[in-house]
Amino acid sequence: MARAHALHILVNTREEAEKLKQQLANGKKFGELARKHSLCPSGKKGGDLGEFGRGQMVSEFDKVVFGKPTLEVHGPIKTKFGWHLIKTLSRS
């Protein structure tokens, strides 16, 4: 089964996600922004979701993690939980 290791930041609005993505583009660290802004419990770990298999996350999230280039920030991505910025660290 395909596996991936990803980080994410979860916020309530697309605008918030866009602002954070701009800060990342300007050199801010993903982990710092996740700790400060993410609504997900993983925020305490810098947004680190650890390793997981295909199908363990909601489909919109899965599509990005398993279908887009690694080591780039993707989003904002809308799921039932809110708006995500996603960075896939590795895939196997």
Image: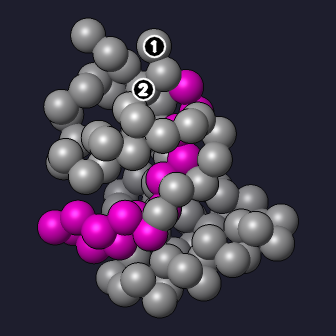
Q: Residue 83 in the image: x percent, y percent?
A: 35, 72
Magenta residues, dominant SS class? strand
Judge the density around disc 1: few (<14), some (14-19), many (≥20) Cα neighbours within 10 Å.
Answer: few
> Is residue 15 placed above or below 20 in the rendered structure?
below
> Would residue 34 appear left or right of 15 to someone viewing this image?
right
Q: Residue 51 in the image: x percent, y percent?
A: 40, 26
Q: Residue at x 55, y 47 (%)?
A: 87
Q: Which span is picked out in magenta?
A: 76-90
- Whether the residues at callouts 1 and 2 have beta carbons within 8 Å, the answer is yes
> Is residue 3 placed above or below 88 in the rendered structure?
above
The residue tagged 1 is 92
Q: Amino acid at mark 1?
A: Ser
Residue 23 visible to the viewer: yes
Is residue 85 part of the magenta span, yes or no? yes
Is residue 58 part of the magenta span, yes or no? no
Residue 46 visible to the viewer: no
Which mark sits nearer the N-terminus, 1 or 2?
2
Secondary-structure class at tag 1: loop
User: Residue 40 got which mark?
Assistant: none
Q: Nearer the viewer, residue 13 or 51?
A: 13
Q: Residue at x 74, y 60 (%)?
A: 29
Q: Which quarter of the rendered picture does the C terminus lie within?
A: top left
User: Residue 4 got which mark?
Assistant: 2
Image quadrant of residue 35?
A: bottom right
Q: Amino acid at mark 2?
A: Ala
Image quadrant of residue 82?
A: bottom left
* Structural distance between the alpha carbons of marks 1 and 2: 6 Å
